Structure formats: structure tokens, C-alpha cells
Amino acid sequence: MGKLRGFFSKNQKINVLVMTILIVVAELSRFAKLETVYPLLMIIVTILGGIPIILRAFSALRYRVISIELLVAVAIIGAAIIGEYTEGAIVVWLFNLGDVLEALTLRKTRAAVKSLTEMAPQTAEVIDSVDDATGEVTDIDLVDEGDLVLVKAGDRIPVDGQVKRGTGLVNEASLTGESRSVEKNLDETVSAGTILEDGTLVVEASRVGEDTTFGKIIELVEQAQDSKSKAQRVIDKFAKYYTPLVMVMALVFGLLTKDDELAITVLVLGCPGALVIGVPVSTVAGIGRAAKLGVLTKGSASLSALKKVDTLVFDKTGTVTKGQPEVVDQWWAPEAGDQDRQLLVSVETASNHPLAKAVIDKLAQEPLPVDDNETIAGQGMVAQVAGHQVAVGNAKLLTNHQIDLVAVAQTAPAWQAKGRSLVYIAIDGQLRGLLGISDPLKDNAKETFARLRELGYTNLIMLSGDNQATADQIGQEVGMSKVIGDLMPADKVAKIKKLQAAGHKVAFLGDGVNDSPALATAEVGIAMGNGTDVALDVSDVVLLHSDLGRLPLALMIAKKTVVNMNQNIAIAVLTVALLFLGLMVDSIHMASGMLVHELSILIVILNGMRLLKVR
């Protein structure tokens, strides 16, 4: 029986084509008054179309599942018994045609997701040193973290990593959904699956295989397609009880009316095919389109939850801001020169403070050897460089070393009011400089928050570990409704729970390890795609490439998908109700009812496919 099922499953489209030809020939034979040919052809159609349906129904019964196919199988056998070969043939043809349409539609909706996985490169050209011009082509599974990979114009970048040589233009459409080229320079990050359109790059692999952004896409999409929404679970449970109910109704109708054809018609019209296919089509189409546009969701349940969100809570660093501090303000004493800047860079090179890299990148000086250094917790560092004592840190450090700060008495408070982090520089007991460092907004942050407000999201809250003044400045720039600073990870969780206790449905956006508790606590956790593995693991939605601008899109797709699901459910239920009403007033019969039934399946399929066009 398994081989027979496999044969019909493999040749489903051919079988439907043969059935269609036979029905056309049968109708022509009736027109030509070949009375014996017509019923014979209809019996053949019934057999060809009925066998796969009966096999599926029997297979389900083996696992104690009363499927929709059982309704049709009983209806087919009943129609044959009472001699309604035409009705039986049309019913099985329409049912099998519906199966083919369903398979073709699901294949198309999944194509948006499958196309992403097919972009994953299978090989990489590994080189031994940064200066090598050629390397050995290696299977991608054999590439390790730390390997150097040579990428030439036109190639797909095979790993996540940093550029160690060269410059180039990279098309990141596979991750962002936008076909625009981004210039990549030394030490900048690139992602697997993106295309190097121009130039040559040497990339040091930081993530390979399943750990790359592309690997995570594949994993998340597979999880999403395997998951079921609440609506789908309800429908599955409904079908379990619905099929026996319809069969009992058909039996009762048959016994009361003594009309076998009416009883069999009840079985045929009771098939809720549109209800069974409607939600999966919407789900797969919505998830697939979202993935194509740079939004990964861990299943339709995540989309359903996202649709209900009324409060958006944001971490600051790496979410609203770039997470890459920059020196934006500088003050230098009149007597300060390049040597002072070189001494500063030398000290910062020996420091592991998060702001040190911003200073080094801005001043671009060659560092000198540091003879001795002392890190003072919460204040900064004091070091001996080329015979000079250099103190770099906050105002408290310099005050404790009796250094006069009068020269910046007005500048420092003004910069702090703008949310700047201050770095003081003193050399040999004299104040030589003051730097204002800021973590700038993401390029599209202001436009994103304006779009969120247009979509009706007014409860926008930022929870930050930074000081209140810095957090307030960022919040004011993007138009947050509320900003709370100086928070530890546990404090963020407490704030989210307080919002939930007040009846709000909360989505939290973050990217770091410290954001993981908040991501897990919120109804919907949304991680930035370049965030930590822990943040990605506990989140429900991932914005690829850490593109904050994808958030309004994610919210819009979630709403459209859930609305589409509900529309399909309504279409399916209304169709069954109208069919039974038509049956009661004797305006619907078996074949015409099955035609309406299959048309309803086509309608919900086409309705679900509208999600593939969301922009």
C-alpha cells in the first residue's frame, strides 16, 4: 500500500491531467450519443482519483486520525453504490485538482525562503597569508574560524568575518532585502551569502557554517515553518471532531429522509478544505516574505504575538545607536601639539576601556611604548610614556591628582548636557585636552521612529544602562515617550514586568548578553541580527543586519499575516455554511457543491499569496 501511495503522490499532476482529459472525452462522447462510453470513462476517473484519497484516509485511520479524506472516501464509495458515477467522478477530480493547486501554491510561497538558503556558498578559497594572490578551494564545511578567505569580484562571501585586505562594494540584498551596494574597507565586517560586486577582499573568518548569519537564517526559517500558530492548532483540533460530526449528520439525514444521495451530498459538502489549507498558506507566505525582506520570525506564533504588541521597549546601545562610540567634540590647550595626541594614543592603546578605540581611531597617531601604567577603577589610567606622566580619565581622576580644570569649567557641563562621555587628558600635571565621545544614532533611527508613530505606536520606551543625561539626549532625538537610565539588566526586567502588569503587550529590542533576560521576559523579544548568540537564541524575531528600519516592516507584516489568516478562516466557514443552506433549499447538489468548495480553496490560496507582494 505504501508503494501505491508513493506512486500516486509522485505522479499527482499527471493523474489529474489524465482525469481531466478523460472527463473532456466523456462529455464529447455524450454529445456524440455514445451512451456506453460516458459511464465507463466516468468510472475510470472515479477509480483514478478515488484510490489516492482512499489510501490517505486509510493511512490516517491506522494512526487513529479521522481525516477530511475519510469524508470524501465515504462519499465516493456511496456515490458508486447508488450509481452516481458522474457525481463521484467530478467530486474526485475536483478534490485532486485542489490538492495539486495547494501543493503548487505552498511550493511557491516557500520559494521566497528557499531562495535564501540556495544563496549559501558551498566552497571558499582559503589562503595562508594576507598577501597571497591565490589559494586552495575548500569545501565550506572544512573552513575554520580564523582562516583567511580570498573573495574576488562576483563571488559570494562564504563566511562572516572582518576585512583584512582590500576594499570592495558588497551587495547585501540577501540579508537586507535591498539591492544596494555597501563599501567595505579594512577591519569592517562582511556576512556570508552577500555578493562582492567589485574589488578583491581578504576576509578573516569569525563565524563559519551554521554559525554565520546565513546559517541562522536557515535554522530559524526551518523552525518557523515547523511551528504552528494558535489558529492552526485550533483548526487541527476542530478537524479531529468535525469529520465524525459530519458523518453522523449524513447518517441521520439518510435515515430520516431515506435519501441516500442527500446523505452522500452532506459528506461531500462538509469537507472544510479551505479551512484546512487557509491558515498554513497565510503563515508560510507571511514568514517567507518577511525573511525575504530581512525579518526572521521563529514561527507564526511569533507573528501573532507581534500583532498584539502595543508597547515597544528599546535598549540604547547597539539598538537605537550604532554601538560604536565616536569622538565628536575636542578641546585642546593652546600649547598642546601632536606629541600630546601621540602620548594620549599610547596610553589608550594599553587600555581595555570601551572608549579607548574611539580615541585611537579619531587621532590616528603612532603609539609609543608605555613604560608603566596603573588603572584606577572608576576613574581612568595613569601611565609613564617617553619620560612623561600621562593621566587619562574622568574629572575625578584629574581632581585627585590636583590638576586644575578651570579651562573647561563651562565646556564640560555643556558637553555633558548633550549626552557626551568626557575624557580628560593631563600631561605632567597640566590639563592638555578634553574629548567628548558619543555613541551616534543609527542612520535610519529618526525615520524609523517617525514611521512607528505613523503606524500608531505611541508608547515608545527606552531602558538604558547609561547615565540618565546621555539616555535622555538620545531619547529626545528620536522622540521616545519615556526614557529611563542607570539600569542594570534585572532592573530592565522589572520595568517590563511592571508594564505587563498594567495590561500592556510588550516587545523588547536588544542586542547584547545583558539584554537576554529582558528579551525572554517580553511577549515578543526582537534581536538585532548582529547581536550576541544568546540574544538571538532567546528572541522571537530577528532584524537581519541589525537594521532598525526593518522594525516597522516586521510589525506591518505581522498585522497583515494575522488579518489574512482570519480572512481565510472566515471565507472557509462562510463557504460551508452557504453550501449547507443551499442544500436545504435544494439549490446545491453534489457536483455543484464540490465545485463551490474547490473554488473556496482557490480563493483562500490566492488571498494568502497576496502576502508575497507586501512591500
Image: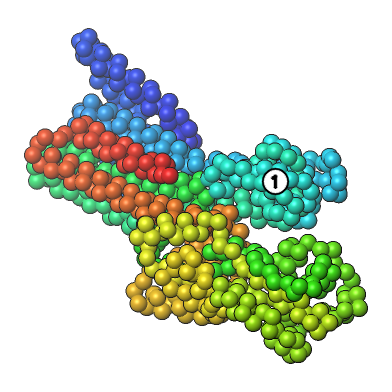
The N terminus, quarter of image: top left
Quarter placement of the C terminus = top left
216 to the left or right of 334:
left
Q: Position of residue 573 (x, y in %)?
A: 23, 48
Is 371 left or right of 72, judged from the image as shown?
Answer: right
Residue 182, above or below 460? above
Colouring rule applied to residues: rainbow
Q: Name the residue located 69 percent from the left edge and 36 percent from the top edge.
A: 154
- Residue furthest top as drawn: 32
> Can you give x and y, in whole percent of width and height, for residue 483 in the image?
47, 74
- At which x and y percent is residue 613? 41, 41
Asked where in the image residue 506 lies, by quadrant, the reply is bottom left
Q: Quadrant of residue 49?
A: top left
- Residue 459 vertical position relative to residue 78 in the rendered view, above or below: below
Say which of 352 and 330 sits in front. Answer: 330
Q: Residues within 10 Å of mark 1 (few under 14, many from 20)?
A: many
**Direction from residue 561 to residue 569 in the image, left or right:** left
> Element at badge 1?
loop
Residue 565: x, y in percent? 33, 50
Tell me the amino acid under the disc marked 1: Pro
State the residue at coordinates (48%, 32%).
10
- Where does label 1 land, which residue? 158
Residue 241 figure quarter: bottom left
Q: Image height check: is 83 above or below 75? A: above
The residue located at (33%, 19%) in the rendering is 22
